[in-house]
Image: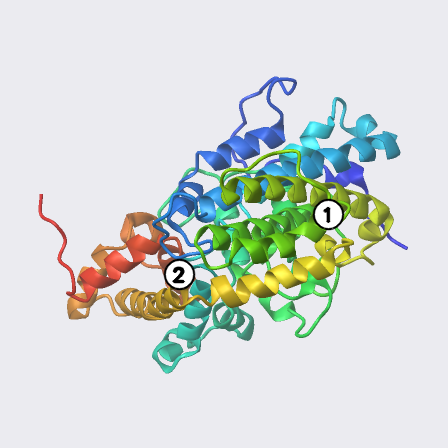
Amino acid sequence: MPQMKWERLISKKRFDAQTIEHATDESVRGEFQRDYDRLVFSTPFRRLQNKTQVMPMPESDFVHNRLTHSLETSCVGRSLGRMVGKTLLERHPGILETHAGMLESDFGDMVAAACLTHDIGNPPFGHSGEDAISSFFRSPEAANFLVGLTPAQIADLHNFEGNAAGFRILTHTHPGQSDGSCGMRLTYSTLATFTKYPRPSDAVVKGTKRASEKKYGFFQAEQAHFKKIAESLGMLPAGEHAYHRHPMAFLVEAADDICYRIIDFEDGCRLGLIPFEQAWELLRPLLNEKPGKPSSITFHDPREQLALWRARIINNLVYECADIFLDHEEEILNGTFDTSLINLVQQKAALDEIKKISIDRIYRHRPVLEIEAAGFEVLGGLLEAFLKAVFEPSAGRHRKYLDLVPDQFLGPQRQLSEHPYEKILNITDFISGLTDSSAISLFRKIKGIELPRMY
């Protein structure tokens, strides 16, 4: 049976770098840490501070947004990567023969960098933003824009996916830019680790139980980019244009699962949506302690106790997920394992109950639903206005809308592409890259609801 090899899966080659990278002392800062640092200073990452995680546009400083969620996920991912990396270096001497000086910390940095970007392609208003964009492209208002597109290109838009938008951000250079490179020039291994769903939109399997088949990870526009990465790393094919996951992608998924299930739940408690007494009963099984064990700490605020329990639970889940990965390493390498690690932990039933309560009490909280519903109007309205501007640039007010589109989303000298799919993707990049508040503000201004301040 064919099997992926760690010697190939680890690659410090940077994606489509046309210029020579500055040499660095890897004993001080390795290539995967450079990926991490590069992402932290990037504009798309900074925008996550104003994108929904639990509550749209939260007023509380203690409620997470996409930025704080991504930072915490990267910390958990770093721990998972280091734990797994330590054992892999012991199991596979060939890694050090091929990659001299490779450390367990390099595995941690690789996973941490991928975790840092796992939500970088999410549009405003959380996952409902993805639904809003998909809904617009399925509507009659979008039909004329889709004329001439292939079925696969239409599938990209009818089922808009933040994961694919993220891969595009990381690898794509917009037509208004010309620095001789593509995207952020990350390493092949970090890009593959980021890609939890290594397949295009027309290869998604409905109703599948395999973790990597339920969504897609790149648009048709970037399909050749991912193929180049996958073939270089020796990732196994899983059908036409689809591949089995890079093993480290399972750790990215686990880090995200751990954080959103536990920390989103904690946010719900802090907001008063879930009583602390109920939280104790739901979280206690995850501590793996003997029933009735007294606490050695006196708490003066239930939020302090909740924070301590959260930290201990995350620690337990990190160790367990690392062990599960290592127990299934061979199956992961040959592509027969395709299950989220979190689904195999001992306390899965308790985690499932927490997820159910979070959906009922937090994600379906009325103010959340109201803002998400408004997001459909905002994103749909913006897409319609700006797509008309690029498809009918000579028409009246459409010229004004076109003037509002940043240079990078148009062609050189702001000359529009002749290809409708490229026009649509560039405008979708613009709209999906907005923060929650900037999307609302732009919508209000173009609709005449709010006028900009004149300085």
Q: Position of residue 279 (x, y in %)?
A: 58, 55
In the figure, 413 relative to 367: above or below? above
Identify which amino acid the numbered label 2 is placed on.
Answer: Thr
Q: Residue 134: give x, y in percent of width and height.
A: 45, 71
Going by the numbered disc 1, the residue's amino acid type is Gly
From what the image shows, is residue 340 above or below residue 132?
Answer: above
Distance between the Cα atoms at labels 1 and 2?
A: 54 Å
Q: Secondary structure at mark 2?
A: helix
Q: Is residue 4 left or right of residue 307?
A: right
The residue lying furthest to the left in this view is 454
SS label for mark 1: loop
Farthest residue in the right direction? 1
Q: Nearer the viewer, residue 414 or 215?
A: 215
Taking the spot 42% from the left edge, 61% from the top edge, the residue there is 425
Residue 256 numbered tag: none
Q: 364 above or below 23? A: below
* Picture coordinates of residue 1, whole percent (x, y): 90, 55
Instruction: Point out the tag, 1 or 2, that comes first from the N-terminus.
Output: 1
In the picture, which quadrant includes the C terminus?
Answer: top left
Classify 10 Å Cα crowding around label 2: few (below 14), some (14-19), many (20 and above): many
Q: Nearer the viewer, residue 248 or 164?
A: 248
The residue that appears at 70% across and 46% down in the rendered structure is 287
Q: Which mark is residue 428?
A: 2
Residue shown at the point (43%, 74%) measured from the top left: 135
Q: Which mark is residue 292?
A: 1
Q: Classify residue 436 as left or right of residue 180.
A: left
Of tags 1 and 2, the one toward the viewer is 1
Image position of 351 with respect to 176: above or below? below
